[in-house]
Structures are given as C-alpha cells and as structure tokens.
Image (tube, helix red, strand yellow):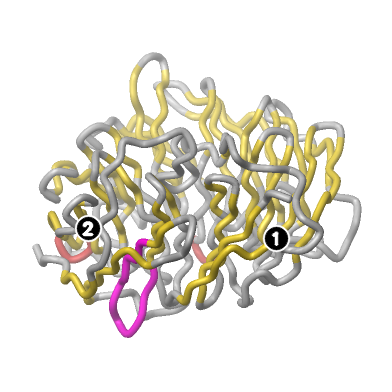
C-alpha cells in the first residue's frame, strides 16, 4: 500500500465527535440528504451575501463539514487533493495530496469524502481508498482496490461514494472483478470480496435491514444486488439497465421498499424487498435522475428530474405510487441534468449545474421558488451537492468554493 504524501500544513483541524450541524459524508449523517442545520434561515437576503470564496481544483465530489471545518476533495496535475478550510472564514487549514488521480473522461474526483471515528476517508477515481487522521493530519493507509483486484476501471472512473458500517468501508469497484469490496477502516486491508463478479455501477452501496437482517444493496452497471454483509451470499438480484451503464444515483431504502432511479431513457421504480427477492411495485419514466438521486421525506420523493424538459424540473412524487403530485410551475429556472436538491424542513435548496442557487418551498401541496441567486459559481457541470452548515451554504464550482449566508 502506498502512503499519502503531505504537501501542505497549517493549523490543525480538531478531531470530531460529530456535532448537531455536522455533515460528515455524502447525503449527510443519516444518508437521507435532509439537513437539520439549526442556523439555517429561509429568509434569504435579496442578493447573495458572499461570506468568502477560495480557489480549488477540478472535481465533482461534494464538500462536507465537521467541527467548524469544511473539506473539499479535488484533482490537479494527476494528484488527488484534500483541502480543509475554516468554515467561518475560508482560511485554509491544511492540504494534502497523493499521485494517481483520474485523468480519463470528465477528469477529477467523484466520490465525496467521509469522516468517521476521527479519520477522514477518500475514494479517488483511479480506485485509491485513503485514510487520514484528522488530529495529526498523518496518513493512516492507502489502498487501490482496482489494482488489488486486478480489475479494469469503469469508463468514467471509480465513483462509488463510501458506505461505512462499523469497522468496514464498502465501495463498488470496476470491471471483470468482484462488484464490491469491504475494506477494514483501521488498516486498509480488503476483508471481503463480493461473490458476485459483475461490472460495477457508479452508485454508493447502501445498508438495509430486511426481516431483521442486514443487507448490502449494490446498484451495479445493469443489475441491482442484495448481498450479505460479508458479501459472500447473493440474496437476490433484479435487472436495471441504463444507457452507457450509468447506474449512479444512490438508492433509497425504507421499511422494506427500495427506490432506484437513473437517467437517459430510464426513470425511477420502487421495489418490495424480502430476504428472497425484489418485486417491482411501480415504475415512472418521469422520475429520472442520472446521478443526484432523490430525497425521501414524509412519504414523498423530492428530486430534480431530467424527464421534464428542460432538464431539472423539481418535482414531488408519492413514495407508495410514484405519482407526481407537485412540480415547479415556472420555466427558466430548471436545475439541469446534473442539478441537485437538499431538504430542510418544508424547503429545498437547489443547485443548478450552471451554478445558480435556489430556495424552494416544497410539499406535496405544491412547489414555489422563494429566492434565486444566479451564477454564484462558474461552471457548466456543477455536479457537487450544496452543503448546508451553520447557517451558510457552501457551493463547489469549476475552480472555487463559495460560502453564501442564508441569514438576512
């Protein structure tokens, strides 16, 4: 295993525990993309109030935050780089890099970092899993799961956001190899290799409890799998095909039901999951998200769908039936194919793939745009999710991260 190389040091970031407003991983502490930030305001200023901005490198990974520090994972000159900023001021706290960034199509990072147990973990597009101690900033370990498995990488690079459960980190892999692995988060050793050998997808594995037993659900390139936690038993599988094998949106599991969505000519569907199989309950071609996925709250799905032209109309759909019950009525403010939404109370924060930030009131009874800030960052592929933290929103653009206050 290669060691990460420290390229810059400054002020130390304190180790966790996770506080109430912390957002330590992809889709937040509960993996639901619902913020409970206690300082968030829905009374946004008329014009965007920029608190700070800082240059960063390329990538699609979303920012995360813990203990007053915001972390951004990017790539430059064949190096993957993790940078820590003070959340309130934008002062750079530290920065470290390792060689072997993804330089293929859509170069840059994909997977969002994750903080757990005083360490921060990253998964690079070339397959490198890394661990770093947040208190000392020293590298703990680095393991390339693609090369260890002698796998081929995916067309657009390893993109699976990490699932951390207990001592294990689960990720999808590549081609011609076990579809997923579990890595010991203490030492970086691969402890479990999936009995299923299939082309991986780009989506995060998720944890589900079915009939009182844990399952790891893997949204592969053309098939959804339910696996035992040690990845040695295939419990069930069901096909899900998407153009270019881009199954990339994180599935949502709740009370025995599983929602999956993908883009291009596909859509979204709900399955009933048991320990013996998956039964499709409904399918709706208008619930289509290429990689941002949806938010489940109170029996309703909230998402930006690329099926409602122009791409990125914000819609609300019933979880039980898939029926769209509300959608944004005004045109010209769609979020685009790669636009994302985060839920807070009865509101959504939406980020368009062109860098515009919006606040919507959104319930099953209707959606209304409350405020819109045009082009808070530059870029035509702003595909990272906005971070809500301590009353501010952090947006990663093409070459900068910007902090916007929500308070009047």
Q: Residues within 10 Å of mark 2 (few under 14, many from 20)?
A: many
So how many labels did they put on this image? 2
**Residue at x 24%, y 32% (from the top left corner):** 166
Q: Which residue is mark 1?
A: 357
Q: Left or right: where does residue 138 sit relative to residue 103?
A: left
Out of 213 and 364, give the one closest to the viewer.
364
Query: Would residue 76 be counted in the magenta stretch?
Result: yes
Tell me: 140 left or right of 288. Answer: left
Left or right relative to 393: residue 58: left
Residue 121 horizontal/vertical position (percent): 28, 53
Q: Is residue 229 above or below residue 369?
A: above
User: Where's residue 294, x and y in %?
Assistant: 62, 44
- What residue sits 83% from the left and 43% below the top? 367
Q: At 16% from the left edge and 71% from the top edge, which residue is drawn?
A: 5
In the displayed structure image, the side of residue 195 where residue 206 appears, left or right: right
Chain part drawn in magenta: 74-84
Find residue 35 and name its label: none
Tell which of 2 and 12 is nearer to you: 12
Residue behind mark 2: 130
């Amino acid at each position: 295993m290669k060691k990460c190389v420290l390229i810059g040091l400054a002020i130390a970031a304190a180790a966790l525990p996770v506080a109430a407003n912390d957002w330590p991983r992809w889709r937040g502490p509960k993996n639901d993309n619902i913020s409970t930030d206690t300082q968030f305001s829905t009374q946004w200023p008329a014009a965007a109030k920029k608190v700070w901005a800082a240059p960063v490198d390329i990538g699609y990974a979303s920012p995360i935050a813990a203990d007053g520090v915001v972390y951004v994972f990017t790539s430059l000159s064949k190096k993957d780089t993790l940078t820590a900023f003070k959340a309130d001021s934008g002062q750079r706290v530290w920065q470290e890099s390792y060689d072997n960034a993804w330089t293929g199509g859509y170069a840059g990072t994909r997977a969002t970092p994750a903080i757990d147990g005083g360490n921060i973990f990253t998964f690079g597009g070339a397959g490198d899993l890394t661990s770093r101690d947040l208190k000392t900033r020293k590298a703990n370990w680095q393991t390339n799961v693609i090369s260890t498995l002698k796998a081929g990488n995916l067309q657009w690079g390893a993109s699976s956001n990490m699932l951390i459960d207990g001592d294990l980190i689960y990720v999808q892999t590549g081609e011609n190899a076990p579809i997923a692995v579990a890595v010991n988060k203490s030492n970086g050793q691969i402890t479990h290799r999936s009995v299923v050998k299939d082309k991986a997808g780009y989506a995060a594995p998720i944890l589900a409890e079915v009939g009182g037993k844990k399952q790891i659900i893997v949204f592969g390139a053309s098939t959804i799998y339910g696996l035992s936690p040690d990845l040695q038993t295939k419990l069930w599988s069901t096909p899900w095909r998407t153009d270019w094998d881009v199954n990339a949106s994180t599935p949502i599991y709740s009370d025995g039901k599983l929602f999956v969505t993908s883009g291009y000519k596909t859509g979204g569907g709900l399955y009933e999951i048991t320990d013996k199989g998956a039964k499709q309950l409904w399918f709706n071609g208008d619930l289509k998200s290429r990689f941002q996925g949806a938010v489940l709250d109170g029996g309703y799905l909230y998402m930006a769908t690329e099926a409602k032209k122009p791409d990125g109309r914000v819609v609300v759909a019933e979880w039980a039936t898939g029926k769209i019950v509300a959608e944004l009525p005004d045109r010209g403010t769609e979020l685009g194919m790669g636009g994302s939404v985060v839920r807070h109370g009865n509101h959504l924060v939406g980020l368009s793939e062109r860098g515009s930030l919006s606040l919507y009131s959104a319930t099953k009874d209707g959606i209304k745009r409350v405020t819109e800030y045009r082009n808070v960052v530059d870029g035509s592929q702003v595909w990272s999710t906005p971070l809500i933290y301590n009353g501010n929103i952090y947006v990663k653009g093409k070459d900068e991260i910007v902090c916007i206050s929500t308070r009047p």
